[in-house]
Amino acid sequence: MRVTEKMIFESTIAQTGRSRENLSQAQNEVASGVRVQHPGDDPVAASLSIGHTVDKARFAAVGQSAQRAADELNAADTALDGITTAANRAQVIATQFGNDSYSASDRATAAVEVDGLFKQAVALLNTTYGGRYIFGGFTDNTAPFSGVGAFLGDSNVRAVEVAPGLYQSASIDANAIVKGAGGGVDLLQTLKDLSTALRTNDGPGIRGNLDPLNASINQLASGRTQAGMGQDAFLTAVTTAQTATSDETVKIGKLLDADILDASTRLASAQYALNATLSAAAKTLTMSLADKLG
Amino acid sequence: MDLVGVIMNAGEGLGVFRAQVATTSHNIANANTPGYARQEAVPTETTPAEEVGINGYLGRGVALAGVVQARDKFVEAQIGVAMANSSSSSAQSDALATVTALDPQGQGGITDALGKFYSSLRDLNQNPGDMGLRQAVVQSAQRVSRAFNLTASGLASARNGIDQNVATLADKTNSLLAGVADLNRRISLAINSGRNPNDLLDIRQNDLDQLAQMIGARPVPDSHGSVNVVLPGGTCLVSGIVASQLGVQANTLNRGHYDLVFTPPDGSRATILNTNELGGQIGGIIVARDQVLGAAESSLDNLAYDISSAVNAQHRLGYALDGSPGSDMFVAMVGPQAAATNLAVDPALLADPSLIAAAGSATSGPGDSTNLQAIIATESAGLTGGLNVQQGMAKLTSDFGIAVNMVDDNSAFDKNLLADLTSARESSSGVSVDDELIHLTAAQTAYNALTKVITTTNTLLDTLMKLI
């Protein structure tokens, strides 16, 4: 093949351009740590990364919601624990002052303590978390229990995701657990009845509150079990979501990030190739018959 | 032959070698001129020879047969198409490489915004009565709108930029078409008067190369030395010495993007040239604009329309914080046309986040988020075509990426093919300075030898004259 100087020039330009392009690409990958910057760099990886990016955001959001739900159930459990303590104390008082050896004055003094337990229970039932009354059901913007123990909330139970699209109860139905809706015992009414019986020195009346108090304590235990199980479920969801978020991050990295070792090797190789191209060009371009002729 | 004849023959030879030196000089001077084909001053033996004695012939020297160009017609026939294809795929590749609107990791991109939108809905599900969380949902919905708006704007801007290139290239093409028509006239005149207009042929070849690169036009030679210029679709742009005109015209059915319009020399019957009639840079960038970017723009619009419609439909089924029925979360649109550009959060919702219809009942309390959970479920629900939001976005990215990838591959292939053909053409038609220096030395040596012949013959004549 006849080779002209122009062919050598153009070939040198093309080869140098290619070498510089390879060098630039490897340099960008090493510097940015990103392999796929444009969908055209790797359409499959770019497309798959969309799904993983959305999944990552979804798992992160589910994890955060689950953590808040677990915290809220923890607050509910703490409140129910306090109410259970109050109910237990009321039971002790009912047992102790059910004995007719106590005077009317003693029982009246005990009634004052029971009134305090009642107020304590109402206060705990009006616990807020994040500005919401956690025992109000969907009616969570006003105190669910009045000063006289009337329930002003509703029986709805909120639900929060433990996995994308899978919901778990995230609140306790105080109407059932405390007020005994659906066939249970109304703890607050029992405390009020106990107080009245103590105040009126009504021995049988005092003793008659022992069973309802016992049933109420069982109801509270059931509520605490629900809260505990819910917490467990949400904490498991938090762990699962965190693991899934990390997995998705790794997957995205594998798809889009540069393999630094590979990119560095290619960078070194591209540097070597460019150096060789330039050396070859420098030698070839200076060779001309014009220099040899006199 | 007498001695004077010998001197005259030598003189003729000097003329031939002078022509060879001049041609070499011309070749070296044009060694880097685009489209230039090296020339050769071809010597030929002067005939008839002088008959002397019995069957003896004395040669009569050398004459210049002509100055011819070294051209490989076989390669030149292929190179135009290769140039058109390479320009087309390179132009497509360059146009698409600059589009960053669909970059997978782009901050503020649609994927990121959609992820944050559904995250904010999940946060609100935790406490649906909280005005701060409601405000966050409105802001994330705005972010989704803005991401769609910006992506649509990025694609539209790329398409608009291509429009400007189409207009500029059409002007350049017109200038080249007029140039070829004029060169046809001058070349025909030269050929009809018996001359060989090598340099005009070079200039015309260079113009034809540029036309192939610019619009994919190919030359069709006629028998009078002219070339007609036709598009891949058959439209004749130059017929002999008459050139047509190209122009641009906004197409309202294609979002106002330019069509290329062909106007015949008499100014009548202006017609729109279809994409399949075009090649080269103009054909390539129009394909990139209307097929790749146009398809991405349409897919984006469909996605914006589908997502906003799905969210709106569910949002309308819920109830706001005050128990009023839900309205649209995003401004309702009649169809996908320009949906990504026009996507916006409903102004009423923007002004009052309490209108977010999270509740499933008008009478339930502020903690009711049953409808919100149904809105969250739109994230995984099948939209038009059966794909969900994430799959729709992934398909859009994948379709665009594959198109770019294919164009890049085609561009690399076309570039290699063109490089091979250009190399082959350069090999036969290009100027080698080394060759020319050798030709120069050969002509110089012959010239010097001939001057010696003249000197010697002159000495012989002097000797002869002294005898008188």
Image (cartoon, coloured by chain):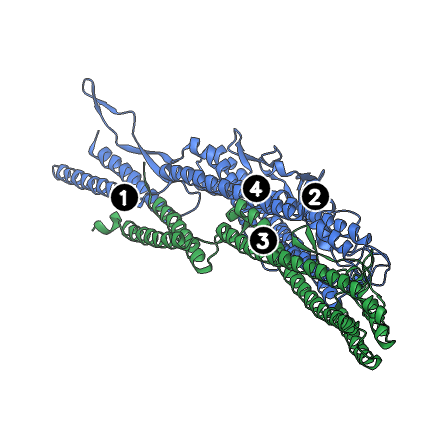
Mark 2 lies on residue: B382
Return the residue at label 3. Answer: A53
Asked whether disc 1 touches disc 3, contact meaning CB atoms under 8 Å apart, the reply is: no
For badge 3, the amino acid type reads Thr
Residue B60 located left or right of residue A11: left
Residue A149 visible in image:
no
Q: Which residue, given by chain and number where applicable, does mark 4 sit on?
A: B215
Q: Residue at 20% x, 51% y: name it.
A: A294
Circles 4 and 3 on the same chain: no
Residue at the outermost top position: B54
Of residues B411 and A122, the one drawn nearer to the viewer in this rendering: A122
Chain drawn in blue:
B
Q: Which numbered mark, 4 or 3, is in the foreground of this view?
A: 3
Mark 1, Cα crowd under 10 Å, few <14 / some 14-19 / many 20+, is many
Same subunit, labels 2 and 1: the answer reads yes
Chain containing mark 4: B
Q: Chain of mark 2?
A: B
Give the residue drawn at x 72%, y 49%: B378
Q: Quadrant of the N terminus of chain B?
A: top left
Q: Is residue B398 visible?
A: yes
Q: Which residue is mark 1?
A: B440
Look at label 1 and name its amino acid.
Answer: Leu
Spatial separation of the CA atoms under disc 2 and disc 1: 78 Å
Which chain's residue wears label 1? B
Determine whether, in the image, residue B297 is placed left or right of residue A206: left
Badge 3 local density, few (<14 within 10 Å), some, or many (20+)? many
Tint applied to chain A in the drawing: green
Dot 4 or dot 1: first in sequence order is 4
The residue tagged with tag 2: helix, strand or loop? loop
Amino acid type, label 2? Gly
**What is the distance, in whole Å, between disc 2 and disc 3 at their CAs?**
19 Å
Q: Quadrant of residue B239?
A: top right
